[in-house]
Image: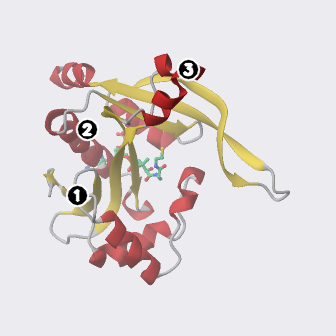
Amino acid sequence: MSTIETERLVLRPFRESDAADVLEYLRHPTPNCFVGMKLDSLDEARAEMVKRSADAEYCFAITLKGSGKVIGEIDAEPSTYEPPMLSSSEDAGAKEKAPPMPDTFSPCWMLNAAYQGKGYAYEAAHAFFDYLFTRKGVRRIFAYVDDYNVRSQHLCEKLGMRNEGLFTEYVSFVRDAEGNPVYENTMQYAILKREWIDFNSKP
Ligand SMILES: CC(C)(COP(=O)(O)OP(=O)(O)OC[C@H]1O[C@@H](n2cnc3c(N)ncnc32)[C@H](O)[C@@H]1OP(=O)(O)O)[C@@H](O)C(=O)NCCC(=O)NCCS
């Protein structure tokens, strides 16, 4: 089991007893990309915590030192990117079997609104990136961020991530009143391990 400690926080795997704290911010998750994470009851939250506790390496509760309160979460998934050289029709079978790239991860971060604007997200994400690059052998981290999510863009930039571009009307998570998909414009940010080392060695 992995635990990451910073000046004010402990990042650790989820436990069933975290349900009430997590329900506080997942009753009404924002932005739209998190709509699928919505929890409606304590029972639902407990079941979700049990599921999450199975991942003790890449899925962490962000907790306050001292009180131990869960104020948010940070996790990372391996990329399912498929190498282009496997995209021709004769290689279709091989493409289906292509494994996730274990050296490329995409993080997701969220704080309870009551704890935003206090530097906790940066403190957690910085320590988490360091953990991924130095302890988990990660080579590249990339993040998708909605074009209106200025706080998350700012966090990416503070972490030294490069803006790699904007995908226009890339994905839809919700429908409008008429039932039509609402498309999001999605920015991509990324940082390589060597860039992380460079960025953090600057005074
Ligand atoms: C994205 C998100 C995690 C960013 O959280 P955040 O609290 O704004 O981010 P930070 O930790 O960087 O803190 C922001 C501010 O706290 C301030 N702050 C206050 N006290 C501080 C302290 N003791 N130390 C450091 N910073 C402090 C800083 O001024 C900082 O602003 P700055 O970077 O302009 O200096 C948060 O907005 C969130 O959970 N959003 C909803 C979910 C979401 O959008 N997830 C991402 C989807 S792509």
Above-or-below relation of 113 to 5: below
Above-or-below relation of 68 to 144: below
Q: Is residue 78 visible?
A: yes
What kind of element bears circle 3?
helix
Label 1 – label 2 distance at C-alpha = 16 Å
Q: Quadrant of the N terminus?
A: bottom left
Q: Position of residue 38 (x, y in %)?
A: 53, 66
Mark 1 or mark 2: whose residue is earlier in sequence: 1
The residue type indicated by label 2 comes to Phe
Name which residue lies at 51% across and 22% down.
Answer: 91
Q: Quadrant of the C terminus?
A: top left
Q: Nearer the viewer, mark 1 or mark 2?
A: 1
Name which residue lies at 74% across and 54% down.
Answer: 175
Q: Position of residue 90 (x, y in %)?
A: 56, 20
Q: Alpha-carbon neighbours of circle 2 within 10 Å: few (<14), some, or many (≥20)?
A: many
Name which residue lies at 32% across and 72% down.
Answer: 50
Label 1 – label 3 distance at C-alpha = 39 Å
The residue type indicated by label 3 comes to Glu
What kind of element bears circle 2?
helix
What kind of element bears circle 1?
loop
Q: Position of residue 162 (x, y in %)?
A: 40, 23
Q: What is the image's colouring?
A: secondary structure
Q: Is residue 203 visible?
A: no
Q: Which residue is mark 3?
A: 90
Q: Where, by quadrant of the figure, is residue 113 drawn?
A: bottom left
Q: Which residue is mark 2?
A: 129
In front of the other: 123 or 108: 108
Q: Which residue is mark 1?
A: 56
Mark 2 or mark 3: whose residue is earlier in sequence: 3
